[in-house]
Image (cartoon, rainbow, N blue to C red):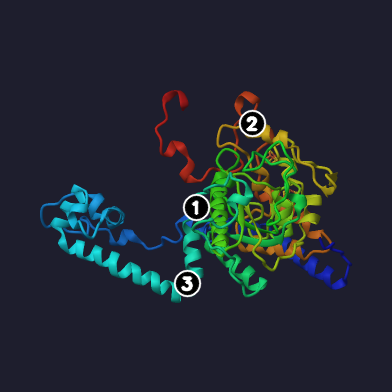
């Protein structure tokens, strides 16, 4: 990774101190920033979850009766015959030209006797349209390769065969899939396409890098087609890694540890990754999704760093400029040739040296207050995973914690104050602004005493970092039994 060197130029100093004064310019600005942070317009990457897409004022147009009109006797639909997607497969399997209606089961036969016009149309589809469509598809269909690949990928949200060996599961289907990889215009154009598709598939973040085999587990996690007792040989087709990532719902995540859930964006990123793998296979290349819930064969944070998604923070989670560390990633290993991204350095390493908010507010003491150490040959902050894991079971709400992610100053919603602070820290070679911003963060986002996060029988108060969002306040919606209240 490129090492950032800070030469102390006068111009940079003025820029940094000027920015620092601007930030110091007042508590009022900070408070205004918090207020605007509550504005739904600042949700990054989850805008549609906040109902911001459904923005038509319906209440103005409410009426007392539905706009459909009952004009006679009604009957419920028989889906077996009246729904064309059920009728056509049934018809296709049974129809025989010589036997005609007698080739059909009694239900279908009766339906066509009652609806001869549908029999005519269904036969026309079978005898005329289908054969001609297949014939023309051979001639002109290539025009739509990408459209078809995109559509099939969009539907590929169920991780079929994810636990099979790579040589079986990573390649296009031997029977139905493309036999040869398509010839691609250039690695740059492919990278551009893959990134656009990543966003289309629902990802907020997309990055690409060469896969460093050092990041692949020495022994597999739980199998996934590998022999767990044998060392994992890195398949030769795992040449590249595509990183995708989606944010966790902001309000529940801020109220951690009792209210947030990682499943939220785990599931979204999983869907994106399986869509991406399906898309790449549609083009004839190999692809394997490594996702939360269906397991990874590799260690994720360094791959995120290689792909230019962000930098690893003191809390060990990768911090991105867009979402801070409020996101969950998934990775797709592949052999489709692509131009790769470069790592980024936007000041996190320097900021984390002095900030330490995550370490101070981690209830389990899992995050070090000290300097980076040599861990498996790399200099990084230590994390006591077992202490962290124990705390996951020391609160009453959703499993897990995520507090270090919630309290990190980089994990703020996308308001103007946050954007300004990000620019200031990224462009401050002196570090002068860092302590100011850390202090502002502590002042504007006060936290409970760390002991209080624990459950009462472990000496805590079952506290949360911030108030739960209105839609997770149980008592407002559920009448609790007496013993619970
Ligand atoms: S998830 Fe919670 S317990 Fe684990 S390191 Fe972060 S703050 Fe500490
Ligand atoms: S809370 Fe501070 S020290 Fe911890 S990861 Fe975030 S910026 Fe770094």
Label 2: state its secondary structure.
Answer: loop
- Ligand 2 is within 8 Å of the C-beta of the residue at disc 3: no
Q: Residues within 10 Å of mark 2 (few under 14, many from 20)?
A: many
Q: What residue is shown with label 3?
A: 144
Image-based side of 403 in relation to 352, left or right: left
Q: Is residue 123 above or below residue 386?
A: below
Q: What residue is shown with label 2?
A: 454
Q: Is residue 440 visible?
A: yes
Image-based side of 186 in relation to 482, left or right: right
> Residue 10, position in %: x, y?
87, 71
Earlier-in-chain disc, 1 versus 2: 1
Query: Which residue corresponds to the image point at 44% horizontal and 61% vertical from the top-left?
Result: 53
Callout in the foreground (3, 1) = 3
Q: Is residue 45 visible?
A: no
Label 3: state its secondary structure.
Answer: helix
Earlier-in-chain disc, 2 versus 3: 3
Query: Which residue corresponds to the image point at 48% horizontal and 69% vertical from the top-left?
Result: 147
Estimate the spatial distance between the alpha carbons at disc 3 and disc 1, rounded to whole Å: 21 Å
> Residue 383, position in %: x, y?
76, 41
Estimate the spatial distance between the alpha carbons at disc 1 and disc 2, rounded to whole Å: 37 Å
Q: Do the residues under discs 3 and 1 have CB atoms within 8 angstroms?
A: no
Image-based side of 231 in relation to 84, left or right: right
Identify which residue, 289 or 67, lies in the foreground. Answer: 289
Estimate the spatial distance between the alpha carbons at disc 2 and disc 3, rounded to whole Å: 56 Å
Earlier-in-chain disc, 3 versus 1: 3
Q: Name the image quarter holding residue 401.
A: top right
Q: What residue is shown with label 1?
A: 157
């Amino acid at each position: 990774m490129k090492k950032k060197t800070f030469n102390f130029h006068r111009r940079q100093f003025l820029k940094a101190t000027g920015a620092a004064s601007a930030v110091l310019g007042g508590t009022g600005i900070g408070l205004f920033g918090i207020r605007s942070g509550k504005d739904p317009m600042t949700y990054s990457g989850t805008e549609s979850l906040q109902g911001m897409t459904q923005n038509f004022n319906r209440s103005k147009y409410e009426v007392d009766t539905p706009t459909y009109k009952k004009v006679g006797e009604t009957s419920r639909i028989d889906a077996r015959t009246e729904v064309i997607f059920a009728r056509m497969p049934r018809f296709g399997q049974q129809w025989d030209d010589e036997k005609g209606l007698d080739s059909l089961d009694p239900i279908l036969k009766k339906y066509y006797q009652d609806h001869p016009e549908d029999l005519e149309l269904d036969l026309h589809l079978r005898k005329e349209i289908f054969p001609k469509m297949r014939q023309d598809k051979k001639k002109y269909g290539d025009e739509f390769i990408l459209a078809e690949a995109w559509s099939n990928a969009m539907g590929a949200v169920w991780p079929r065969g994810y636990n099979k060996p790579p040589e079986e599961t990573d390649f296009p289907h031997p029977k139905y899939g493309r036999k040869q990889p398509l010839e691609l215009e250039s690695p740059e154009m492919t990278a551009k396409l893959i990134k656009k598709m990543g966003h289309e598939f629902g990802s907020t973040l997309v990055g690409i890098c060469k896969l460093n085999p050092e990041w692949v587990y020495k022994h597999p996690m739980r199998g996934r087609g590998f022999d767990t007792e044998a060392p994992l040989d890195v398949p030769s087709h795992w040449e590249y890694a595509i990183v995708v990532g989606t944010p966790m719902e902001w309000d529940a995540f801020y109220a951690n540890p009792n209210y947030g859930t990682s499943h939220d964006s785990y599931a979204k990123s999983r869907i994106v990754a399986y869509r991406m793998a399906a898309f790449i296979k549609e083009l004839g290349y190999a692809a394997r999704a490594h996702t939360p819930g269906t397991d990874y064969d590799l260690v994720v944070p360094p791959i995120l760093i290689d792909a230019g998604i962000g930098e690893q923070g003191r809390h060990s989670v990768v911090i991105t400029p867009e979402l801070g560390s409020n996101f969950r990633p998934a990775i797709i290993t592949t052999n489709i040739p692509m131009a790769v991204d470069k790592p980024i350095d936007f000041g996190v390493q320097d900021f984390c040296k002095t900030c330490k908010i995550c370490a101070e507010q981690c209830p389990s003491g899992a995050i070090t207050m000290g300097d980076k150490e040599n861990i498996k040959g790399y200099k990084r902050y230590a994390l006591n995973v077992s202490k962290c894991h124990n705390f996951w079971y020391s609160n009453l709400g959703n499993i897990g914690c995520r507090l270090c992610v919630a309290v990190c100053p980089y994990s703020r919603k996308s308001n103007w104050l946050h954007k300004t602070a990000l620019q200031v820290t990224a462009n401050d070679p002196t570090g002068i602004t860092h302590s100011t911003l850390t202090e502002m963060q502590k002042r504007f986002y006060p936290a409970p005493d760390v002991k209080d996060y624990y459950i009462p029988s472990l000496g805590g108060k079952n506290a949360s970092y911030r108030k739960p969002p209105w839609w997770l306040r149980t008592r407002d919606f559920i009448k609790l039994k007496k013993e619970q209240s």
